[in-house]
Image (spheres, grey):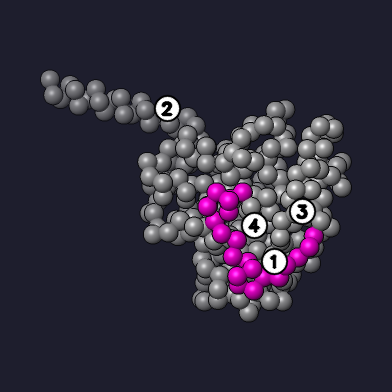
Amino acid sequence: MLLKYIFSLSLTIFALTIVVAQNADETVFLQKMKLPKGETKAQTAITVAKSFIGQPYKAGTLEGKPKEQLVCNLRDFDCSTFVESVVAMSLINHAGSPSFEKFKKQLTELRYRNGSVEGYASRLHYFREWIIQAERNNILQDITSKIGGLKQKKNLNFMTSNRELYPNLKDETTYLAIKNHQKQLNEFDFYYIPKWKIEKVENQIQEGDIIAITSNVDGLDFNHEGFAIRQNGRIYLLHASYEQKKVIISKELLVDYLNRIHKHSGISVLRLT
């Protein structure tokens, strides 16, 4: 009788495993939750981020839906969805009793204004606003000004100034909502470490810090995001690379990577709390 019960239980567990495997993103999430958890969220984030090395880069994974909805894609990334997904997994792992539903909720709270999906304009399109909300929610601290960052006055208006690039902005209500969010965002202080100063403050950057690369493009806050990783005492970038079309650790130093690309002006440094 006991053997029959054990056999029945084994079949049940096997069936549940098959159900889980039918959702590719949930399967990836469960695999990542088995990785060693670090003492800090940043350490966990680096472990998770490294486990994605080699995964494909794919632009526009959040776009093209007829109605705004949470997109949870753990199979291919752009730079921001990579950072966002890794941060969400780190937070959920450290909160205890991780589940895919909790992960999706955390992803929503990171990606959308006040954690609520209410149309295209509710998404935090500017990474600067993403930072402000995450800092307000005690997820991270923008340490840029504390490690030598300079105050920059920049009017963020790239989306509305390039309306033709964003199909959703054809809708006048959405366009005006984005324009209003830009106006509110421009009231916040904005600090960055220019390229020429990065080597001087590099020793203050910790592995697992989020590196947000600031832009020389008019009206735009950031061009790219990734994680700081230290090798041989120097800082490199772990990121979803547009150039290499996959998640990589850059072969060149962070400062050399920035100097090579004209549109990059410097960095902001964000530390998970």
Residue indicated by mark 1: 192
Residue indicated by mark 3: 186
Which of the pair 160/256 is nearer the observer?
160
Residue indicated by mark 4: 225
Residue indicated by mark 2: 19
In this view, the mark in front (3 or 4): 3
Left or right: 140 in relation to 242 = left
**Residue 222, located in which quarter of the rendered image?**
bottom right
Q: What is the distance, in whole Å, between disc 4 and disc 1 at their CAs? A: 14 Å
Q: What is the distance, in whole Å, between disc 1 and disc 3 at their CAs? A: 15 Å
Picture coordinates of residue 240, whole percent (x, y): 62, 54
Give the magenta part as a residue range.
133-154
Answer few, some or many: residues within 10 Å of disc 4's Cα (few below 14, many 20 plus, some between 14 and 19).
Answer: many
Q: Amino acid at mark 1?
A: Tyr
Left or right: 139 in relation to 211 = left
Could you say which disc has been placed on residue 234 in the image? none
Q: What is the distance, in whole Å, between disc 2 and disc 1 at their CAs? A: 47 Å
Which of the pair 190/5 is nearer the observer?
190
Q: Could you tell which of marks 3 and 2 lies nearer the N-terminus?
A: 2
